[in-house]
Image (cartoon, rainbow, N blue to C red):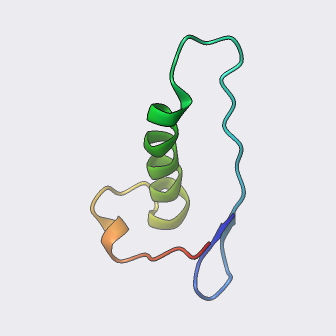
Amino acid sequence: MYSSPDGSRTLTASVTTGDAAIDPAQEFPKALEKLLKVVFCGGQAGAADKAEPTQ
């Protein structure tokens, strides 16, 4: 779970692979980065430096 410092936005997510032939350890960081940018930075790459979500 991630939250903005003021608590106005939170993100709770789960990533599953089912029967897919992928390595979750390699794919999870990519998915997490994309989710964080979309939820906390309006989907703008480069704005992630400004937002510091807490765990």
16 in relation to 9, above or below: above
What residue is rendered at 59% in x and 78% in y? 4
Number of marks in picture: 0
Instruction: Find residue 2 and report its horizontal and vertical position in percent.
Output: 63, 67
The structure residue drawn at horizontal position 35% and vertical position 77%, both measured from the top left corner, is 50
| Image x and y of residue 14, in percent | 71, 43
Image quarter where the C terminus lies is: bottom right
Taking depth in this image into account, of 44 and 28 the one nearest to the observer is: 28
The quarter holding residue 30 reads top left
Relative side of 52 to 19, left or right: left
In the picture shown, does residue 35 fall above or below 17?
below
Q: Where residue 42 sits in the image (x, y, percent)?
A: 46, 61
Residue 5 percent across, percent down from the top left: 58, 86
Left or right of 35: which side holds 7? right
**In this picture, is 27 found above or below 54?**
above
Relative depth, front residue between 42 and 20: 20
At 46% from the left edge and 47% from the top edge, which residue is drawn?
34
Residue at the far left: name it: 46
Q: Quadrant of the N terminus?
A: bottom right
The furthest residue to the bottom: 6
Identity of the residue drawn at 31% across and 72% down: 49
Q: Which is more toward the observer, 21 or 30?
A: 21
| Quarter of the view holding residue 37 | bottom left
